[in-house]
Amino acid sequence: MSLLSRMTAPAAGHDVARLVAALLSEGAREARAALPGRAASRPSRVPTGPTGLGTSAARVTAAPDPAASGTAAPDSAASGTAASDAAVPELYCPPPLRDDPALAAEVNERLLDWAAETGIYVGRLERVRATDFGRLMMLAHPGTDDPRRLLAAARCALAEWATDDYYCDDETMGSRPEVLGSHLGLAYTAMDPTHPPLRYAQQTDQGLRADPVRVALRDSFARLAPYADRTQVTRLRQEVAALFVAYGQEGAWRAEERMPAVWEYLAHRQVNSFVPCLALIDVVDGYALTAAEYDDPRVRRAVSMAGTASTLVNDLYSMAKEQHSAGLDFNLPTVVAAEERCSPREAVERSVEIHDELVRTFEVEAAALTLTGSPALGRFLAGVWSWLGGNREWHGGSARYNDASRA
Ligand SMILES: CC(C)=CCC/C(C)=C(\C)COP(=O)(O)OP(=O)(O)O
């Protein structure tokens, strides 16, 4: 049975399906060509197929490719030895396109220096080091070998993570639902400066410097500027502002001690998601997707689905960590189990099905958009696909999710 005929996602017409299959086959060849030791910085098209042992039958078959023999991408499921890998069933997800530990370490160390400068995670920097955001950037952005560009994206991600940890869901770092709104309101002004009357300028500036999360957010945007044009910065700010709205939504559930419905949680997880990371794919790789293409509803749909899927990966891998949390924590399996009154294992399986449907739909729709859109759009969507693979690989190995004592 071919991959396309297995899909539970909204079906494409036969003509589109044939185009997609052809495109993905080409993508598979290009992805292999981009493996370490080959033309690594060449943009790849959307590759295809799930990872892991026993999944080859589910892959779209490409014509035999002599270049493929004897070289395999780091196979996420096969290589995953971490504890969380054992608990998370196999996901429909591409493999990471490269593994370059030296590059990851360089980005991680520079990120640690920057975190120390800003004051975020003071006293917890060893945990941040072990979390290894440098590795996430290296795995998820295989389109560049430039540590400065990876670092620019890493700073933004760490500042967004710090906002979550400090303000939203880590009581040991001071998060409290009753002050979440006031914290997020000021955090927004770190990305989009206010223009106070002169007599309040000094206080406003002091206020921004008084809190390490605000410092980190402001500095991460400032240091992104050399790599991003104005539309790309505006795009990121818009995505992070939406992220903050969803942080507030989660805080409200916590304050109410209410478990959301599954549909409501999924709507939330599309926004409280890694979309801000996806928004930087072209910046990191050194080209610009136009605002018109980024905002095209068809592109937005595909990217949003990928964003949700990548965040459901986080939900699946962070379940163990969240069990240790003092407050109410939300992840899809927990929400599914509450609504469907099923066992945790069944809830995990249903969550995996939801994840897989989103990835498959992204795969088909991104391939069709690649055919009809600009070269930059094709490159961007291939970048999203690579990001999915790197993200899963990182979650499977990061100490943040694989060592509860570090959480
Ligand atoms: C990098 C980025 C955009 C982060 C913001 C959103 C975020 C922290 C997640 C999507 C991860 O979700 P969660 O709050 O569950 O994170 P942890 O499991 O605590 O890492």
Image (tube, rainbow, N blue to C red):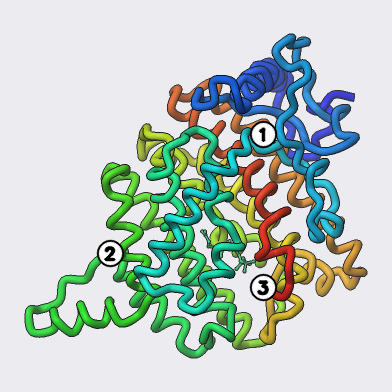
Q: Residue at x 74, y 63 (%)?
A: 402
* First of labels 1, 3 by sequence position: 1
Q: Which amino acid, by three-letter code, is at mark 3?
A: Arg
Q: CA distance from mark 1 to mark 3?
A: 35 Å
Mark 1 touches mark 2? (CB < 8 Å): no
- In the rendered image, the quadrant that contains the N terminus is top right
Indicate the position of residue 407 as horizontal and vertical percent values.
Answer: 66, 73
Q: Residue at x 66, y 17 (%)?
A: 29
Secondary element at image label 3? helix
- At label 2, counting other C-alpha atoms closer than 10 Å, the crowd grade (few under 14, some 14-19, many 20 or more) is some
Q: Which amino acid, by three-letter code, is at mark 1?
A: Glu
For disc 2, the marked residue is 192
Q: Residue at x 61, y 63 (%)?
A: 130
Q: CA distance from mark 1 to mark 2?
A: 34 Å
Residue 298 visible, this orientation: no
Name the disc covering residue 363, or none. Answer: 1
Name the disc covering residue 113, or none. Answer: none
Secondary element at image label 2? loop
